[in-house]
Image: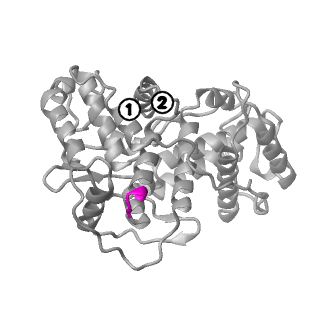
Amino acid sequence: MPKKGESKKPIILSANPADPHGLTQSMERYLEWMRVKNYAGETVEARRFYIGVFVDWCESRSLIRPSEITKPILERYQRHLFHYRKQDGDPLTFRSQYNRIVALRTWFKWLTKHNFILMNPASELDLPKLDKRLPRAILTEQEAETVINQPDVTTATGLRDRAILETFYSTGIRRFELMRVAVHDLDPERGTLFIRHGKGKKDRIIPIGERAIAWITKYLNDVRPELACGRDQGILFLTHLGEAFTPNRLTQLARTYVEKAKLHKAGACHLFRHTMATLMLENGADIRFIQAMLGHAELSTTQIYTQVSIKKLKEVHTLTHPAKATRSKKVDWSEDPAPTADELLSALAAEAEEESEDVDEDARAGDARGDA
């Protein structure tokens, strides 16, 4: 999967990629339709990558038009994905295979609906069965504090990194969400953070702890003015070049401090998301409030509400997040049926798999050459 926000096209081997009836142009029409319908940019680029890899695979086998693709050909490609090995010798995860096949199913469904082909060859294509997995690594409260204390806060970048780690730990936001946080998205008085264009282009307001606010405030006062260097576009966290972080740069930053803590646990940005959710659950938070913080609109086995009062959500966060000052009262939980903790953590594990694909340079390099 390509980096979020980055256009990454596989190498297309077609002798005539401009053929209006060819696979390449059919893919471009579909992607243009997605943009017109206001699909998220990350979704469009992911589809471009997954479908482009398939187009490359087809054209290297002299299959150049959608009308030439049959169900047996798609099943052959599916077997190819199963047997494919990346440069490090590892296979594609079933989640990765699933994402690639889903992209093809939606593409061929669109081609059929818009009369570019007469029959949909992918309509009965079976998807890989996905296991419900729990996160592989979770930090304890003490371990989380150890990692967060790793940056050297006597330096400008160390203070910035501490503010970033505190934000991840306090809010559990996604990596690409943190990249987009603007200075004015933080409301220190209310203790909230506005998340713009989260997954599915959905905005939400979530609590952020007093300790995280204190570190962000110190970063804003002491470090950010120097980093902005007169090119200030309002993004909260900036690199040493005064630019917004890229997804891989944030992953590298978080992983560096996890490894420096010598806890023998792998992970980066998503590790804090898992940890926040787990520790708040252990401290008695209702699962639905955690879901509202994480920005999960629904889980596979249950419909849940997303319109949670920010006042009550802030109260839950204050009472159950480990990085708090006091815990003095109980919350009046809703009587609506809630999903299980396993369902919540399984959803987080699926997110982590997708994020790990994002930084798998070997897989992307192999895919771009048509290997998978």
Residue drawn where x is 21% and y is 24% of the image: 227
On-image quarter of the C terminus: top right
Give the residue at the far right of this rendering: 72
| Above or below 127: residue 298 | below
Question: In front: 360, or 371?
Answer: 360
Report the magenta stretch's main SS: loop
Question: In front: 95, or 126?
Answer: 95
Magenta-colored stretch includes residue 282: yes
Q: Position of residue 260 (x, y in %)?
A: 42, 23
On-image quarter of the N terminus: top right
Residue drawn where x is 17% and y is 40% of the image: 214
Q: For the magenta stretch, what is the residue range? A: 281-285
Contact between labelled residues 2 and 1, with CB atoms less than 8 Å apart: yes
Q: What is the image's colouring?
A: one colour
Magenta-colored stretch includes residue 129: no
Q: Quadrant of residue 144?
A: top left
Read off the residue under disc 1. Answer: 147
The kind of residue on which mark 2 rests is Leu
**Visible residue check, residue 326:** yes
Read off the residue under disc 2. Answer: 263
Q: CA distance from mark 1 to mark 2?
A: 9 Å
Judged from the image, the secondary structure of the residue bearing numbered disc 1 is: helix
| Above or below 155: residue 140 | below
**Visible residue check, residue 15:** no
The kind of residue on which mark 1 rests is Val
- Left or right, residue 51 beside residue 292: right
Q: Position of residue 370 (x, y in %)?
A: 72, 31
Q: Position of residue 4 (x, y in %)?
A: 47, 39
Label placed on residue 365: none
